[in-house]
Amino acid sequence: MVNIVLPVDFGDKTEQLVEGAVKFAKQINGRIFLIHVAPSDIGFAIGDMGFQYFPEVEENEIREELIQLNKIQQRILAHDVDCEHILKQGIAKDIILEHAEAKKADFIVMGSHGRSGIYDVFVGSLTKGITKDSNIPVLVLPIHE
């Protein structure tokens, strides 16, 4: 079975990215390792008192993101594609590349924005960073309106 790491950010193009990854997985007998990387500073805020940490904000945000990951996983499983998911906190590029190595990924599937001809905007800075630093092939799916 071919291992595919699929990072998601819950943006407005996530559904298209998931559909493309599922189609790819079905073509190559792949299984999807879904990952979302939340920032490490979710519960921090800057105010009159300086930096403050609100653990309940972080807990609520993580809980909501896990619910979204579960929903995406269920949609993938409904297409008869094996899938597991994980949520981690940290620097997205580093976490995704580490996860891909740990899962012995054959591919990382990312999306392009398709907004303009400027490379960083077209491909996206995270996608660009991963394609630049990955030892694993990165499949960039065009995600358009």
Image: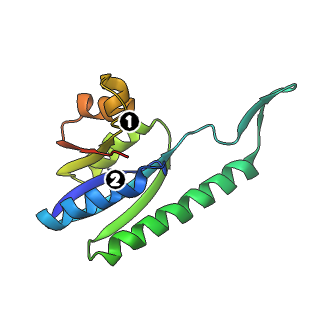
Foreground pick, 77 / 63: 77
Residue at the spot x=31%, y=33% of the render? 123
Label 1: few (<14), some or many (≥20) within 10 Å?
many
Q: Quadrant of the N terminus?
A: bottom left
CB within 8 Å, label 2 to label 1:
no
Percent from the top left, x then y, of residue 44?
71, 36
Horizontal side, residue 135 vs residue 5: left or right: left
| Amino acid type of the residue that numbered disc 1 sits on in the rendered structure | Lys
Which image quadrant for residue 60?
bottom right
Secondary structure beneath label 1 = helix
Secondary structure beneath label 2 = helix
**Residue most toward the right?**
48
- Does 73 sit above or below residue 91? below
Label for residue 17? 2
**Residue most toward the left?**
28
Residue at the spot x=17%, y=42% of the render? 137
Residue at the spot x=62%, y=37% of the render? 41
Label for residue 93? 1
Foreground pick, 90 / 27: 27
Label for residue 77? none
- Does 40 sit above or below residue 79? above
